């Protein structure tokens, strides 16, 4: 008996704002899309819905996350917008008055609603990425319960590590009771984000690794997102960072944006390692050239 294919679901989650979740989600989504994976980005941040407008939209659906969660609307034509990047679609955040959190708190299926709706997209996508608000809420907990894995960006400083321990880990521990309903609480993959070249930052990075090493529920990924201006530049231009910088600049120690995102993708989603490794400098240069020609 063959089982129907299920899309991999990954939540970018942190209980703290400003950790780089949206930048990571959008660049990771664009990279996996360029690698040939049908990728759906779902923006669940009502306050700063930057993932909704990070890349230009070629088709803007009349609805978005509000219709999905309020009315269980799963018709792609009504809620899924198409970005300018082939294979990358988005369900935009259109909950301007922040009503969904109360709805989730009061609904009978509450924190399970997103998980229950996701099977509607399994046939059309290989990967679903959730982008979230940096604050603990019913919405954030709902994303955790809908995810197969969690990717948590963490700035390389001890204050952030302590906040992560207090906020995100406390939230995850509070959701473990859902395991009684047959749900698997996802593994947390911590991504050190914004590491600069100073000795202090590297020392803190080592300390952060030591804090979480040995805990079976958490992994500090080897992949590191450096504090590189290329990610800000890519965001301002609405272009994936790996397309903008696929070769390492001669004046910088840190690797190219392509190398950074590719390593992260391989570590986060090892089942597609071959696809990601095929995204060489030469291949990405071709993709970037084609994209410029189509503009």
Image (cartoon, rainbow, N blue to C red):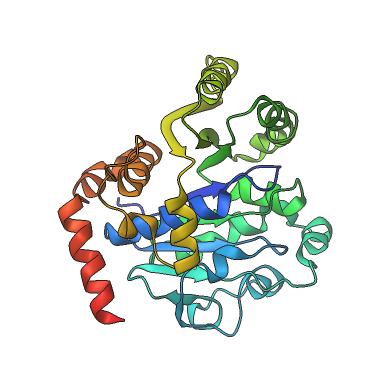
Outermost residue on the left side: it is 282
Classify residue 136 as left or right of residue 29.
right
* Residue 233, x across and y down, in percent: 46, 59
Asked if 157 appears above or below 276 in the picture, the reply is: above
Q: Residue at horizontal 53%, vertical 14%? A: 214
In which image quadrant can residue 97 be found?
Answer: bottom right
Q: Split into 4 quadrants, where in the image is the C terminus?
A: bottom left
- Whether residue 139 is visible, yes or no, is yes
Q: Which of 217 and 44 is in front in this view?
A: 44
Q: Residue 69, image x and y in percent?
A: 67, 67
Whether 267 is drawn above or below 135: the answer is: above
| Residue projecting furthest to the front | 251
Q: Residue at x 52, y 41 (%)?
A: 151
How far across and down, in percent of the image, does residue 71 sit?
68, 75
Left/right placement of residue 113 relative to residue 215 reads right
Q: How many marks?
A: 0
Q: Where is residue 79 in the image (x, y as percent from the top left)?
A: 55, 77
**In the rendered image, is residue 37 in sight?**
no
Q: Which of 200 and 94 is in front in this view?
A: 200
x 49%, y 33%: residue: 196
Q: What residue is rendered at 32% in x and 45% in y?
A: 256
**Is residue 66 shown above or below 243?**
below
Name the foreground residue: 119 vs 52: 52
Q: In this view, does 181 lie above or below 23?
A: above
| In the image: residue 100, left or right of residue 82 | right
């Amino acid at each position: 008996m063959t089982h129907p294919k299920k899309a991999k679901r990954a939540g970018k989650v942190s209980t703290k704002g400003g950790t780089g979740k949206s930048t990571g989600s959008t660049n990771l989504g664009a990279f996996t899309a360029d690698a040939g994976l049908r990728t759906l980005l779902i923006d669940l941040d009502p306050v700063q819905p930057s993932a909704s407008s990070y890349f230009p939209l070629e088709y803007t659906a009349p609805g978005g996350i509000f219709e999905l969660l309020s009315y269980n609307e799963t018709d792609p034509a009504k809620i899924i917008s198409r970005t300018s990047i082939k294979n990358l679609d988005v369900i935009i955040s259109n909950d301007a008055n922040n009503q969904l959190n109360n709805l989730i708190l009061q609904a009978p299926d509450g924190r399970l609603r997103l998980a229950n709706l996701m099977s509607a997209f399994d046939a059309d996508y290989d990967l679903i990425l959730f982008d979230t608000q940096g604050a603990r809420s019913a919405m954030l907990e709902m994303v955790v319960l809908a995810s197969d894995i969690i990717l948590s960006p963490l700035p390389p400083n001890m204050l952030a590590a302590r906040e992560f321990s207090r906020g995100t880990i406390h939230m995850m521990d509070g959701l473990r009771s859902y395991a009684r309903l047959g749900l698997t609480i996802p593994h947390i993959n911590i991504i050190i984000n914004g590491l600069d070249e100073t000795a202090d930052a590297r020392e803190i990075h080592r300390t952060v690794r030591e804090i979480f090493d040995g805990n079976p529920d958490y992994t500090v990924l080897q992949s590191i997102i450096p504090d590189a201006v290329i990610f800000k530049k890519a965001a301002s231009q609405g272009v994936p960072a790996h397309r903008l910088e696929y070769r390492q600049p001669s004046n910088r120690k840190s690797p190219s944006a392509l190398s950074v995102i590719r390593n992260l993708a391989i570590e986060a989603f090892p089942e597609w390692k071959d696809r990601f490794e095929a995204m060489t400098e030469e291949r990405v240069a071709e993709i970037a050239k084609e994209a410029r020609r189509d503009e």
